[in-house]
Image (tube, helix red, strand yellow):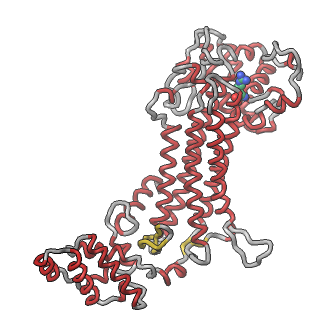
Amino acid sequence: MASEQKSWQARISEATDAIAQAFVESISYDWRLYKHDIAGSIAHATMLAKVKLITDADRDAIVNGLREIEKEIDRDGPKWAGFKPELEDIHMCVESELTRRIGEPGRRLHTGRSRNDQVAVDLRLWLNESAGKLCGQLDDLSATLLSLAERSRDIVIPSFTHLQRAQPILAGAEALAWATMFAADEERLQVSQVRGVFYLDLYYDCPLGSGAIAGSSLPLDCGCTASLLEGDPRRFKQGPSNSIESTASRDRACDFVYCCAMIAQHLSRWAEQWIIYMSTEFGFIKIADRYTTSSSMMPQKRNPDMLELIRGRCGNVYGDLFALMTILKGLPIGYNRDLQEDKRIVFRAYDTVSQCLTMAAAIVNSASYDKDRIEPTLDRGFLDATSLAEYLVTKGIPFRTAHHVVGTLVAKCEKSNRYALSQLSVEEMNEVIASSIALSSTDQSQIANRKSQIQITDDVYTCLGAANVVKRYQSAGAAGGKPFEDQLKAWKERLGV
Ligand code: ARG
């Protein structure tokens, strides 16, 4: 198309170079904004009619034309005939097709508007909607984790700190740990996009009415446009607080991609954990074969490729965050075409995270803990050492002394080729307790007193062994016992299952 045919390029003396045209276009990806663009245009036209800048008949022609176009794009997707690269972007494609259909009223739609405020509003609407969709997916994933936690109620696994055996936990408690991370992601998304509860009113602003940068000399009712953008009424509280900021800022896009990066981080940690659990060395988790692949050379292989890709794609999303931050670095205030790149980034970050969430939910749904592999070694690694120290605390021994007692008992086991504290006799334990108390104080009368008081009995064995320990947890959010049941209950309430 020659540039004199482009209605918005009358002052440009020659046709856009073909290379430049292909370079500048964004319709190949920003067509995804068509619904948001049309919603913005309908609100804008309605406002224009309200302030009498266009007639009610113009408005009706515009609204009906746009609704028709929307239906066609719903049907044809990116193949819709109105998407023409020479028209550059979604805004020009929709407006130009509208004008082709309805004539002059179409030429009035852009009154008091620029693509700069148009794209800002489209992007905000898209971010808001996409944040909502991700929240739904996070809930779906949490529901699969909750169900895994429920069907694994009787499975105890070791927990790990420093990837060394730590304390016993219910397998389900770890499943709910991931769900709790995803719940935090959901809150982050809601705070930044959906609920609009933010400290600054700026976040409620609807950019329409800002025009290109300075606003307009026409009597636009920006508050009216804001309130017309249906959906969550808190989405836009008012028109722009500052037309320059409104067209130049991409803060919400940054917030969104950061939220995506956090989801990707959590997914990658979960994926890594399960990859480790699926190794022959661990053998804790089994997932369905349909979520694994084999090797072209080694016939025995069953590789967790989907989990590895979830782990790896986190790198892409971090890259997206960095790309957006870098595009914005040092950018002069006011619209600059650099900002067009924001959409590639938010779409890519969203698509990656959304696909990973779908994949993750399917994998979790198919997963089970392998009790037969977990149980034989469960009482290795002295997982109950902390439980024993806490038991000693209940007998009046200071925690530091108890810690020393149990450390000594573990060393004693290892020296005498015993792998578990439950293999020690009560007498052996009392001996170590007595000598540790002697070591821990200089006050002789107090020592004599303590030694005669602190004698443990057979009930010590109720705090030993991984299966016993998990039943004893009492503190809020703990990985077994009533606190675990409380977590299950809270999750069921939250997800309504
Ligand atoms: N396609 C552009 C973008 O996505 C729309 C705004 C273009 N504005 C302009 N003055 N060239 O950012």
The answer to whether residue 320 shows anywhere in this view is yes
Residue 167: % across, % down? 41, 72
Write the residue at 89% across / 29% down.
Answer: 18
- Taking the view exactly as shown, the residue that stands out farthest to the left is 445
The answer to whether residue 41 shows anywhere in this view is no
Residue 347: % across, % down? 67, 41
- Taking the view exactly as shown, the residue that stands out farthest to the front is 442
Answer with the quarter of the image where residue 19 lies.
Answer: top right
The count of marks equals 0
Write the residue at 26% across / 76% down.
Answer: 392
Image quadrant occupied by the N terminus: top right
Q: Quarter for ligand 1?
A: top right
Query: Of residues 105 and 321, which is closer to you in this image?
Result: 321
Does residue 232 sit above or below 295 in this rendering?
Answer: above
Does residue 342 sit above or below 477 in this rendering?
Answer: above
Residue 221: % across, % down? 55, 15
Answer with the quarter of the image where residue 95 lies.
Answer: top right
Answer with the quarter of the image where residue 437 lies.
Answer: bottom left
Write the residue at 13% across / 81% down.
Answer: 448
Query: Of residues 320 and 473, which is closer to you in this image?
Result: 320
